[in-house]
Amino acid sequence: MKRFLSNKVLLIIIGILILNSCKKPVEGFLSENVFYQISPFVAEQGITAYSAALQVDGSTAPISVSLIGARNAETGEDVLDSLIKPRSIPIFTGTILPTDTLLADLTKNISTDLKPALNINKIGGRIELSAATKYLPSGAYDIDIQVTNSSGTKIFKNACQIIFNAAENPYANVYKRLRVYTRADPAVVEGEPTSEMGIDVRYTASATTQVILKFVDKNGVAFNPLTGDIKRWSSTFPTLKEWNPYYPEEVTSTGYTYTLPNIGIQFPYVSVVYLPGGGTWTDTGGANTYIRLDENSNVEGKRAQITSSWQFKASGTYEITYRLNGFTKK
């Protein structure tokens, strides 16, 4: 009898072991300490930006991340639909080359696509901001994410705060320099009194884009390019005409006017241009332009080289006035 009971107990134990062995073991690990290393994540409106990947504290890979909520940080208003709504933005479909000097050559390499302002990369959780952020109000937004792996799913409220800053300037004067030559010999450099040259920019937003360059003396009197007061430095140095071959340069009695293509992409579109005197010019920072102030245009009788480099980031009119405070127009 005892032997029978022992066998019966043994069978029960074996059965329990078999049942336990059939249970699927718990796989993986999903940490409670999942976070973005940089929060708030700050970006300029209208500019593509990416965060680092989500920090997962040793959680088992692969991890799937999705955006499940977004709120205006100040008002608490639900803005998820607005952030993920696809909107039209310009994209490059090809490489713009220095030889693409016609408007048709330029536009064939640019198209539009529908992109949301905010996307969370499913693999790794990277925050991806597109140029469509230009359609949204500037400010701070709190986001909620859902993280899933083999261990299960967890929701992280207020996982990151994203701040869209309005662009400080729709343009950038990347570089400027004033080089003055001696009265006795206009080929000999006297100095570089760049501090004596002021540059004023008046920007007016509009659907079209124009850049107007004006050069004035210390009394605000404009030098006249039609009479040779100012001109391009030489055929082996660039002006905005080379960076913008798509529309003709307009020369007036007070300066130069350039109409830029309104394609929604920051100007200049290339980093290399061909020069009328032969060869090329490379500038990765902006559109470099060299203007000559003729020695016969001013009472001081001195030649000057006026150098500046520009980026234009938004459509509108840019009225740029160079104030040459060391010169008096004749």
Image (cartoon, rainbow, N blue to C red):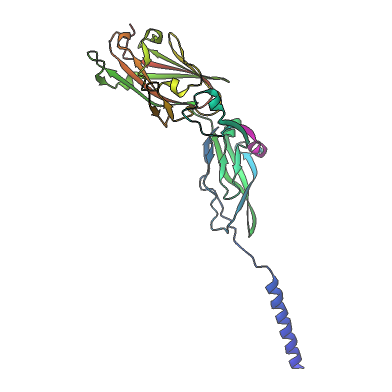
From the top left corner, tell me how far across and down residue 254 is, in percent: 43, 10
Q: Is residue 82 magenta?
A: yes
Which of 107/30 is in front?
A: 107
Of the 4 image quadrants, the one containing the C terminus is top left
Q: Closest to the observer: 231 or 114?
A: 231
**Residue at point 40%, 30% (across, down):** 283
Residue 318 x %, y %: 49, 19
Give yes or no for residue 85 being in the magenta stretch.
yes
- Marks counted in the figure total 0
**Among all residues in the image, which is located at the extreme right?**
1
Image position of 27 with respect to 42: above or below: below
Taking the image as shown, residue 71 lies to the left or right of residue 303, namely: right
Q: Measured from the top left, where is residue 195 in percent x and y?
A: 33, 21
Q: Residue at x 73, y 85 (%)?
A: 9
Q: Is 18 drawn above or below residue 100 in the view shown?
A: below
* Quarter holding residue 133: top right
Q: Going by the image, does 298 lie left or right of 52?
A: left
- Bounds of the magenta segment: 80-89
Quadrant position of residue 280: top left
- Residue occupying the point 65% across, 68% down: 25
Q: Can residue 287 be seen from the camera position used here?
A: no
* Image quarter hosting the N terminus: bottom right
In the picture, measured across the screen, residue 39 lies left or right of residue 173, that is: right
Q: Position of residue 126 (x, y in %)?
A: 56, 46
Q: Residue furthest left?
A: 184
Asked if 230 appears above or below 153 in the picture, the reply is: above
Residue 297 seen in this snapshot: yes
* Residue sitting at the far top: 330
